[in-house]
Amino acid sequence: MEFTQIFTIAAKEFRDRIRNRWVLAVALVFTVFSLAIAYFGGAQQGTVGFRSIEFTIASLVSLVIYLIPLIALLLGFDAIVGERERGSLDLLLSLPITRLELMLGKYLGLAAALTLSTLAGFGLVAVLLYRQFSWAGLFHYGGFMISSVLLGLAFLSMAVLLSVITHERTRASGLAIAAWFFFVLVFDLLLLGALVTTGGRYGGEAMAYLLLLNPADVFRILNVFSLDDVRTMYGLTSIVPPALAKPWLMGAVMAGWIVVPLGLASWRFKP
């Protein structure tokens, strides 16, 4: 595997996203929404402004879980199938480059664009938090930003997998939207429904580990258990055992959600 070929493809993909102002648009969306939620998140309790680093992170977790998976899936669903429909895939593969190098180059270029837009979007809030809570608050917010990037990379890996296994952009886009509905909206409802239906008699302990099958839940657990005061704000604290309350373990699970879909995509993309 030639890394030069991978970085060349990645640099072109990244430049394309910069040129069409995709990074600027997404960063602007993150900035506006994060500022609004962080500043007005306590309006329902009759207060506005930055209340605490724990409350700010807890408010932004809900935003990230809905927004970043959708953006990552829409960003990557046509990475391969788009080239196939435009007829440029055969041209690219006629060059001295392997399918794996092409796929990794595409992924890394898109990942760089998504990472830059995420960090830039939440960066302004970090500056404001530093002025309000100094370095101690910024340390926890930095962990939140890194976990947000990992969540985006996990769903980007899924998008690339969908792009490889489909032969039409419309089907790939439909599957991407379906994946967003399932992991963000439906998955937790199914687990909660099963728990309520059985009256909590079966699978109570296993339910906590089933949450690891959803990267959105891994992100939620990672941030909920990173701060003591945040744990009390979520009902998850009652069903997630202390064994999962380890940031390094949740980080490793999230890394698995990045690597495994890419591995499957590489396997299916072979000639």
Image (tube, helix red, strand yellow):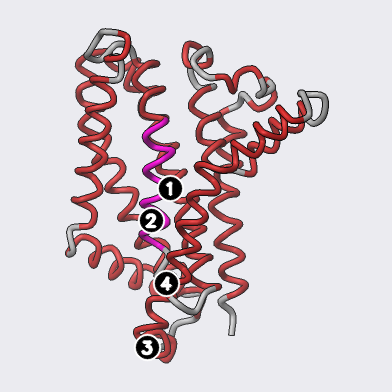
Distance from Cα at disc 4 to Cα at disc 1: 19 Å
Q: Secondary structure at mark 1?
A: helix
Q: Which residue is mark 1?
A: 69
Residue 228 picture location, percent across and down: 51, 12
Q: Decide if residue 127 is on the left or right side of residue 140.
A: left
Q: Which mark is residue 87?
A: 3
Residue interval drawn in magenta: 62-76
Residue at the (40%, 50%) spot, across then down = 70
Task: Please state which of the two labelled residues, at mark 3 or mark 2, is closer to the viewer.
Answer: 3
Q: Mark 2 and 1 residues: CB-CB less than 8 Å, in contact?
A: no
Verify CB contact (< 8 Å) between mark 3 and mark 1: no
**Type of amino acid under label 1:** Pro
Q: CA distance from mark 4 to mark 2?
A: 22 Å
Task: Work out whether mark 3 precedes mark 1 in sequence or the reverse, and give the earlier one.
Answer: 1
Q: Which residue is mark 4?
A: 170
Q: Quadrant of residue 208?
A: top right
* Of the image marks 4 and 2, the number of the one nearer the N terminus: 2
Residue 158 in picture, x, y percent from top left? 52, 58
Label 4 Cα neighbours within 10 Å, binned few <14 / some 14-19 / many ≥20: some
Residue type at mark 4 is Thr
Residue at mark 2 to residue at mark 1: CA–CA distance: 13 Å
Quadrant location of the C terminus in the rendered image: bottom right
Q: Residue at x 46, y 64 (%)?
A: 174
At a point 60% along the width and 74% down the height, the residue shown is 268
Instruction: Say what amino acid the circle numbered 3 marks.
Output: Gly
